[in-house]
Amino acid sequence: MAAVNTNWVIERDAAHVVQTYKRPPFVLTRGEGVTLYDAEGNAYIDWVAGIAVNALGYGDPGLTAAVQRAAEGLLHTSNLYYTEQQAALATALTERSFADRVFFTNSGTEANEGAIKFARRAAYDSGEPGKHELVCFSDAFHGRTMGSLSMTPKEKYQKPFMPLLSGVKIATFNDIASAREAITDKTAAIFIEPVQGEGGINAATPEFLGTLREACDQHGAVLVYDEVQCGVGRTGRLWAHEHAGVAPDIMTLAKPLAGGLPIGAILATEKIASHLHAGDHGSTFAGGPFITSVARYVLERIAEPTFLGHVQSVGAYLRERLEEINSPHIKEIRGRGLMVGMELDVEAAPIIEAGYKHGLLMVNAGTNIIRFVPPLVVQNSHVDSLVERLTGILAAM
């Protein structure tokens, strides 16, 4: 393989790619396990995993074999035709969840857009005029397309694209009184992340989710769990809401489901799915045979009890070791499984920047929180390396 010229890549990107991303000045070229390497040969322990996507890390033999097998078959047919791979993945998802049916998408924001339509279609069929409102929560992140952006109450994301979808109410996360006030007979759906990612690694309490379930039942609304980031094993359970034991009507998935390939999914009960008919929703690329074949392998691998036990064990060790760092800048360590946040009394950006020089890839969740969402195959030894390097970075602040 020819050597990659870092300067050429950065210059070509600046000249030809829409500049919506702020990137560090290196080019990643390969990975092994939980370590990524740049064009200059520098190694980085990855605590980002492509933003909670690369659950099996890099160069995983089983995933590589699954991709190779899938590539020998059909890549695309469209949803005009049946494929075995899509049916098999839908079966695997429903057998392991509350859901009866699945609609496939290409991303998380698409899944949430589709969930809005599913909920509003059910509300339309109820025959109640004006039943179209959506309730979301402070610090939520549901995506960047217009409907999901309307439920992502952050001025920086929303203001340049006003007006957004009407009928969206914002209640306070984990505040039962605020939620009850926002939910009425006009509510079509409530959207919530069981563990908020972008918003700062905030877990919804079982009591809060239980209240939302009761309110949805009372007002005939649809309860939607956005598990795009927190689902598929990330918290140490296959689904993040399992910690609370409160089932939704719809759950949206994406990021890790195909191990790095683009996929999303809307899981729904028969009660909700029965409102959708031919032509109500669709996608050209979603649920193609290549990606669903790979996704089935990833799902079955992550769903193994020993795999989820590993996530729980290393996640607990990560939180324990981060708690041991003696720094006045650390305010709180929180999270579940391998979805952990470190809240600071300073901005996270300089620490993330310093991490590159110490061989660490990290990402923020808001201004002053570092989010740790590594590949789920990370080991305790990687945690020890992180803590050693992070301790030095924080001491130098």
Image (spheres, rainbow, N blue to C red):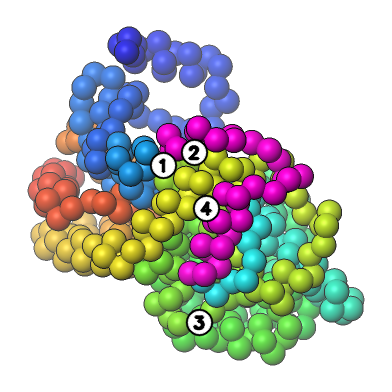
- Residue placed under numbered mark 4 in the picture: 254
Q: Amino acid at mark 2?
A: Ala
Between disc 3 and disc 1, the foreground one is 1
Dot 4 or dot 1: first in sequence order is: 1
Residue range of the region highlighted in magenta in the rendering: 67-96
CB under 8 Å between discs 4 and 3: no
Q: Nearer the viewer, residue 236 or 139?
A: 236
Looking at the rendering, which quadrant does residue 100 occupy?
Answer: bottom right
The answer to whether one can see residue 226 in this image is: no
Q: Earlier in the sequence, mark 4 or mark 3?
A: 3
Q: Of helix, strand and loop, which one carries label 1?
A: helix
Q: Earlier in the sequence, mark 3 or mark 1?
A: 1
Q: Which residue is mark 2?
A: 70
Mark 3 neighbour class, 10 Å CA radius: few under 14, some 14 to 19, many 20 or more:
some
Q: What amino acid is found at the position of numbered circle 3 in the picture?
A: Val
Q: Is residue 92 magenta?
A: yes
Give SS at disc 3. Answer: loop
Q: From the top left corner, tell me how far across and down residue 324 is, in percent.
A: 11, 63
Judge from the rendering whether residue 162 lies leftward or rightward of residue 298; answer left or right. Answer: right
